[in-house]
Amino acid sequence: MTNSALAFVSTQVYVGMGYYVLGAVAAFDAVPVMPQKQAALLGLAPWKVFLRVTLPLSRLGLAVALSIAWVRAIGEFGAVVVTRVLPFRNAGSTSGSTCRASGCPLFMPLLVVFLAVALPLPWLVHVLAQRQRRS
């Protein structure tokens, strides 16, 4: 699995997961308890309370958590390089020739897609937060 797109994606998910979980916990903790209790008193099942009350009220925090995790994963590109280069003979070298020999061009299109999404994501979350604050 060390020489595939799956390795690249798995590494990015692994690197960013902790940041997302911390942000998601904070987003769910910020949801007021009273609307959840009122929905439960009105007869909604716990999973419906989560889907209809908790999730919509925490969606902005979850988006921020995703943005932070995504940008952190992109910033941790070195982990992907290590994953891709270690199986090869010149694993200790960080020269460009090692990267070319190990197939770095194979995962560059994935990096371009990640960067194209990651760079505007924090700005988009900020715009959504400002829009929600005004309404």
Image: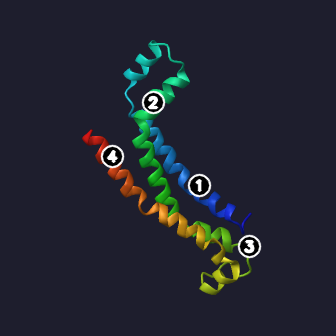
- Which element carries disc 1, helix, strand or loop? helix
Residue 87 got which mark? 3
Distance, label 3 to label 1, CA atoms, is 21 Å
The amino acid at mark 3 is: Pro
Q: Name which of mark 2 and mark 3 comes first in the sequence.
A: 2
| Residue at 66% over, 68% down | 83
Query: Please, is residue 14 above or below residue 77 in the view?
Result: above
Q: Nearer the viewer, mark 4 or mark 1?
A: 4
Provide residue 10's location: percent of width, then percent of height. 64, 57
Quarter containing the C terminus: top left
The amino acid at mark 1 is: Val
Q: Which residue is mark 1?
A: 13
Q: Name which of mark 2 and mark 1 comes first in the sequence.
A: 1
94 relative position to 103: left or right:
left
Residue 129 got which mark? 4
Quarter-wise, where is residue 53 in the image? Answer: top left
- Which element carries disc 2, helix, strand or loop? helix
Q: Badge 3 local density, few (<14 within 10 Å), some, or many (20+)?
A: few
Query: Please, is residue 37 above or below residue 105 in the view?
Result: above
2 relative position to 47: left or right:
right
Q: Nearer the viewer, mark 2 or mark 1?
A: 2
Q: Nearer the viewer, mark 3 or mark 1?
A: 1
Provide residue 97's location: percent of width, then percent of height. 64, 87
Provide residue 126's location: percent of width, then percent of height. 34, 52
Residue 90 got which mark? none
